[in-house]
Image (cartoon, rainbow, N blue to C red):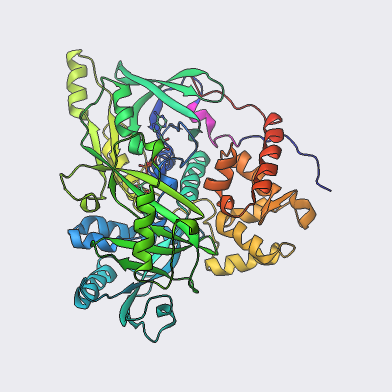
Amino acid sequence: MVPPLPPIRETPPAASDRAAPGAVLDLLVVGGGINGTGIARDAAGRGLRVMLCEKDDLAQGTSSRSSRLIHGGLRYLEYGQWRLVREALHEREVLLRIAPHLVRPMGFVLPHVAGMRPAWMLRLGLFVYDHLARRTRLPASRTIWLDAAPEGRALQAGHRRGFVYADCRTDDARLVVLNAMGARERGAHIRTRCELVGARGQDGLWVAQLRDALTGQTTEVTARVLVNAAGPWVQTLAARVAPARHGLGVRLIKGSHLVVPKFWSGDHAYLLQHSDKRVIFVTPYEGDTAMIGTTDIVFAGAPECAQVSAEETQYLCAAVNSQMRCTLGAADVLHAYAGVRSLADDASDDPAAISRDYVLELSGTAAASAAASADGAQVQPPLLTVLGGKITTFRRLSEHALEQLRPWLPHMGGAWTAQAPMPGGDIAGGSIEAAQAVFLGKAGFLPAEHARGLFDRHGSGAARIIADAGHIDAMGRHFGAGLYEVEVRHLLAHEWAISLDDILWRRTKFGLHLAPEQRDALEQWLAGTQAARVPRAPPLG
Ligand SMILES: Cc1cc2nc3c(=O)[nH]c(=O)nc-3n(C[C@H](O)[C@H](O)[C@H](O)COP(=O)(O)OP(=O)(O)OC[C@H]3O[C@@H](n4cnc5c(N)ncnc54)[C@H](O)[C@@H]3O)c2cc1C
């Protein structure tokens, strides 16, 4: 018997006095993707008063549409992007340490193909990749004979030599939520479904109008610094800020992914070279499915309308079919998604060659502000705009962003995020495997694959989710495939989930595993629960 539901209450920020009603915020961050939430967490941990507003759900933009790799980016070496690759490789190590439940090592098989990059070039590239940054947790690359090794069985005959190297996989949308939770733990206000509709400089501060999509209310907040982390909407947002900022050098590039039934055995992934010189990732995805990506296409529309085209589906299937033992076509696609990158324009003709490195554009200088203020002239408050970047580099990007803002916010603390575990990543003492084994013991009343899924999603937080359960009946309703009511209630109360898609596609990927009638049942349950939910507070005015 499922116990009656108490009303669901959202977790408030830890130190709410820091942003009491009417108080001037230090930082207003616009955009709840990986970069906005990363900056908000870092800033809150330095003692700043922070608010983040996101017009939709957390990670609803590009940050839930990536290839889900925490990687240095082997292919960027070809374009000479040493700084980016070195930093990303360094961050791979840091993220393995601070979010070990969500960032997991993965082996990549890179077959050598006659007529494409020569074997010596692949070997040299991998040697550099192994040594460009300190590597303590992942193995070095090695040669593999594909005609004998099990990894070669999924490839077409004729592949002899290849290489295996290590990178990491993650769940991009969950990494965003962890950042937001970490920011809230340190006092930041996270407002989802809350759009910045306008902002103007006044008396050296920003006065911003925020519209709450759920209540329909618009409120004003005041902040010393505004951060535009709106991803592919960066230009739209720049135009809403007075004085409007036009002409940002941005290129929008669309990339698409297909999810198909997994067609090889083993946990490893493949990196295939394609005849057009691009590379295609084929990675395990959520158990028995595989992800294929990606494309690089110049994009001109509204980012929310980006779709996977029939040509992209055909291109990706053909690329895989030409090298692997499979005959994939549109009918095999279980799920497909497209994301749009906003990249700093480096005038490259080839969309794949545009640098993925980030640029932080700061309007005004502290010295100019001080001079204007001494003259009695109108002081333009600082606006920091984020262009480009990767899921992998969000933490360093956030550190760089805050260091740039120090002249305006001299009271902020120092860098701290390299050592502090992200929520769920506080694995006391031992390894992530040992921590998982302890959790599986506690959750022995659950089918093992359901317990493993909970741990993968929540790390050390999984124990709190099942804390009051102790028996499968106390997990509440089972919506199917391992999604239990206690977890859904946790997502609603503590992870800002509101809609069915928030739960099925961003906080989890149960969208792939629930049958249509199970989804309908969850939607109905949700409608009943939302009616009993404690109304959320309006944004601070
Ligand atoms: C196809 C593809 C594959 C990729 N693969 C990888 C990978 O494997 N590894 C990797 O490291 N990186 C990868 N990336 C890069 C990575 O996904 C992006 O760099 C990153 O997600 C960008 O995050 P962001 O926070 O800048 O933008 P977004 O995630 O887009 O966040 C911006 C947010 O701002 C919000 N917003 C916009 N306007 C407003 C407003 N007025 N008010 C309030 N909110 C607003 C939007 O709703 C959105 O949620 C990939 C990118 C693509 C496109």
The residue shown at (30%, 15%) is 203
| Front-most of residues 287 and 93 | 287
Q: How many numbered marks have been drawn onto this rendered protein structure?
A: 0
Q: Tell me the residue at 46%/60% (across/down).
A: 103
Which residue is located at x 81 percent, y 44 percent?
Answer: 3
Q: Is residue 391 visible?
A: no
Does 120 appear above or below 482?
below
Report the image quarter containing ligand 1: top left
Q: Position of residue 120 (x, y in %)?
A: 20, 77
Where is residue 477 shown, x and y percent of the image? 74, 48
Is there any visible trace of residue 48 in the rendered image?
A: yes
Q: Quadrant of residue 269?
A: bottom left
Q: Which quadrant of the view contains residue 481?
A: bottom right
User: Magenta includes 17?
Assistant: yes
Locate residue 238, reporting x and y percent. 29, 27
Q: Give the farthest residue toward the bottom.
A: 148
Residue furthest to the right in view is 1
Residue 53 within the magenta-colored segment of the rendering:
no
Front in this rendered view, residue 516 or 201: 516
Q: Which residues are magenta?
A: 11-19
Q: Give 209 or 431, whichever is nearer the viewer.
A: 209
Q: Position of residue 320 (x, y in %)?
A: 37, 65
Q: Residue furthest top?
A: 376
Q: Is residue 29 above or below residue 208?
A: below
The image quadrant of residue 530 is: top right
